[in-house]
Image (cartoon, coloured by chain):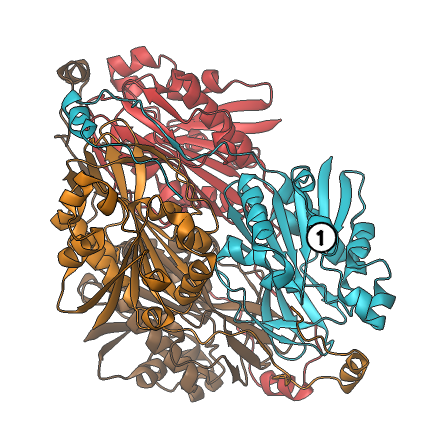
Chain colours: A orange, B cyan, C red, D brown
Amino acid sequence: MIKLTIWNENYHEKTNEYVHMLHPEGIHMTLAKGLADPEFLIRTATLDEPDQGLPDEVLDDTDVLIWWGHVRHKRVPDELAFKIVQRVNDGMGAIFLHSAHRSKPYRYLIGTGGDLRWREVGEHCNVWTATPSHPIAQGIPEVFRIDHEEMYGEPYGIPTPEDVVFISWFAGGDVFRSGVTFRRGSGKIFYFQPGHETFRSYEHPIVLKIIKNAVFWAADRTPAPLTTREIPESVEPLDPATLELHSVHEHHAPVN
Amino acid sequence: MIKLTIWNENYHEKTNEYVHMLHPEGIHMTLAKGLADPEFLIRTATLDEPDQGLPDEVLDDTDVLIWWGHVRHKRVPDELAFKIVQRVNDGMGAIFLHSAHRSKPYRYLIGTGGDLRWREVGEHCNVWTATPSHPIAQGIPEVFRIDHEEMYGEPYGIPTPEDVVFISWFAGGDVFRSGVTFRRGSGKIFYFQPGHETFRSYEHPIVLKIIKNAVFWAADRTPAPLTTREIPESVEPLDPATLELHSVHEHHAPVN
Amino acid sequence: MIKLTIWNENYHEKTNEYVHMLHPEGIHMTLAKGLADPEFLIRTATLDEPDQGLPDEVLDDTDVLIWWGHVRHKRVPDELAFKIVQRVNDGMGAIFLHSAHRSKPYRYLIGTGGDLRWREVGEHCNVWTATPSHPIAQGIPEVFRIDHEEMYGEPYGIPTPEDVVFISWFAGGDVFRSGVTFRRGSGKIFYFQPGHETFRSYEHPIVLKIIKNAVFWAADRTPAPLTTREIPESVEPLDPATLELHSVHEHHAPVN
Amino acid sequence: MIKLTIWNENYHEKTNEYVHMLHPEGIHMTLAKGLADPEFLIRTATLDEPDQGLPDEVLDDTDVLIWWGHVRHKRVPDELAFKIVQRVNDGMGAIFLHSAHRSKPYRYLIGTGGDLRWREVGEHCNVWTATPSHPIAQGIPEVFRIDHEEMYGEPYGIPTPEDVVFISWFAGGDVFRSGVTFRRGSGKIFYFQPGHETFRSYEHPIVLKIIKNAVFWAADRTPAPLTTREIPESVEPLDPATLELHSVHEHHAPVN
């Protein structure tokens, strides 16, 4: 069983009638329903819950975290964002959807701003599979269409990704690396573009299949025991004179 | 002229007699003297100065920033660390020396903890050039020896670097990717291992030559005009019906 | 001065009237004229010349090689292809244009087949700059249009490139990573999509500017002295018993 | 069941008494015995067999290929080497051991010469795990010792690997990226340094465990259906005028 936590800032759903109509229980619930799978144990969390919905006991119990945020990125405390960065490095998978390209956890993991160009007119897009051998692309056709999406366009301000799995074509003449992967420590990261709040992308069976594939992919990791530590003894014998030389110096414990 | 700012936490020099003897004016001044070059305009900055020595007017006037920190990483405000991340993305070069592997700006740029193993007994090391074609390796011998250094050892908790320029061999039996590069946005990043405060590595001519090479390499960048922005008009004509559909939805300005 | 050699299979120009009309002196001369620059010393070479136009004295005198081939890849001897691979590893820049995605030197350098999808109807394309900070993108607008090109589409069978500099949008609904870079040894490699023989892409000022930028970028390399060699003496003293143990074994010189 | 084929040039074993004593049935059989596993269906092949031991029916029936060659690389026909490159791109795993760094299939896959420095005195080495979270490192200690090995040293002439899983320390003062991974098409590639013919590295339990891990890792791939092909119909409607324009041009079938 994969423990999947779906986080959502849950703002548009409460302030915009049209978005509320599309996602009456919130985008997190739209996703939870669409991603339901016998292999997943799904939990949701939202920004307005205590601890932004992600207290330690929830993060500690999460194999893969899905993140949807848009206009309230700054309300996520740095402390929480850094905790997520740490959890990812320890092996938790992370899937950032749509406008999460500007979310704190994503930006702190990739080290850039995640900037891009956008146009919000609901044009259609074709999503192309650029790396068909990637596990996230299994069972996905070479190309599929989404009738209405927000355009996200290059240049996309990310470091060279490990894999560009999908590239999207937009009717307005733009292109976008819409599905890209990164790794940090033991953790796998997937960014995927579809999912504007005013459209029905999370009811699109191929979009859902891709996100499901990404959950399976990101959950399959090996925990790394890596910790910063002093190693007093060496594997090879060392010259006692060297040690002597050093012994005149005090050791400096970190003072913060 | 390359505007080079050398930042130092400047703590050991003021609290430890032996370190003070080695670096009477601080490690930043040891570096400033060693790196003096007709092509460089060198400025130093330290943690205990106002704005931690790096007010906006200094950062704005810096082409390449060298960072030395060890036991006071946490005293660097997140706000400053993020400003540096932004400046690097905008094209400022960044060179992180020795224990800066745990500094905030480095960690926020690479997205991992930068963890490693260490042993502080002053053993000798051999630094091997793993990528002789890299600009930072120009004029550097295939291998050179440092008589006394702190051992830093693998596993080194970094993402796959763009280039592993140097790998070090330590007498105690350890190895370390001691010179690695990354890019974020328009900025180039070099991490280099030598430089423990109780040794004279910054008087070693090859160590200094490598850092100089890195300054030239990191200064040679092109500023990226990338900014997040809405693109109301498309390159291609769009179906008016699409625009109609969208017009029923209000536009959501970010609320933070 | 950069010594630039432009190689062309020069087949369509001699067998097809329309192509001959567009490139009366061959695509290599169309390129030579378009790329003329006070910094370049340009030479051309074609498949039907002795040694396929690339005897050792030409390759030895080339800083950057441009390659255009389409239907006669197999007529390039493996021996020549491997020589080019070696020269690139030694520092020669290589620019592969359009249908050179299936040329031997390109495929032997990247290790994959370079496969892609294509459609030859002359639709228009928009070329987007995906990495504006790359030297090859300097002075290039965010997007530009080519009125008629052959469509090349994803999935594009290449290893993860160092940089995706350009991504193209095609009117027929396809996308393509149209400008990508790789490095092998000391050599820099750029693949660029435009340039079908029945269109005028090599008269397009921005296409020419990109190729010029790539020549400057690829020429700026440092020769690597790397050669396979036995190192009889070690940097560190070795246990004589170890040497003793080994001395019972003969040394095996390669027998081929 | 993973179908594993172990290929060996099988030369030293027949010409050198000492090597014959260590590997009475050939290095391929030493490996076959050491790697025996209920999950593996192991077959061996050697250079002196018909078709160099690798006729199509064997390659077609191989999930992972292990390659050991040293002084007879040139006797492997290019045709076979390219077949292997193709099979790897189609999804076959490939593990190159020790002196296979200069073998044709390895070099044609990575695009560089695989050059390195070496010293054949039987010094001991410490193998460090640089990427503990990699599947190949599962169950492998942070460091282990091999009492006698040939030294392979940096600089190692390879493209930036996907992962540096292991780095070795040699008693003579050298270092080496001894375990590195690449991908080409759907295929996974692992190079691993231990295994000089005059030593017993393939009886070392940790060395064998690493190779076993690599077999499991390399076998877990998804076949990519990628093939070069023309796409006459577009996803989007195209301007009939465009098609008209093009129709004046004949289509050029490859002539080889």
Question: Would residue A72 be found to the left or right of residue D224 on screen?
Answer: right
Q: Residue at x 83, y 51 (%)?
A: B33
- Please tell me how crowded label 1 is: few (under 14), some (14-19), or many (20+) other residues with Cα within 10 Å: many
| Residue D100 at x, y percent in the picture | 43, 66
Query: Is residue D53 in sight in this rendering?
Result: no
Near-viewer residue (A94 or B40)? A94
Residue C61 drawn above or below residue B75:
above
Task: Give the residue pinned by disc 1.
Answer: B7
Residue C142 is at least partly visible in this image: yes
B20 above or below A181? below
Give percent across and percent down for residue C181.
44, 41
Q: Position of residue A105 (x, y in %)?
A: 41, 55
Left or right, residue A244 beside residue B111: right
Q: Indicate the quadrant containing the C terminus of chain B: top left, top right, bottom left or bottom right.
A: top left
Q: Place residue B116 in its image quadrant.
A: bottom right
- The part of the image, by quadrant, that contains residue D53 is bottom left
- Where A27 falls versus A244 (above or below)? above
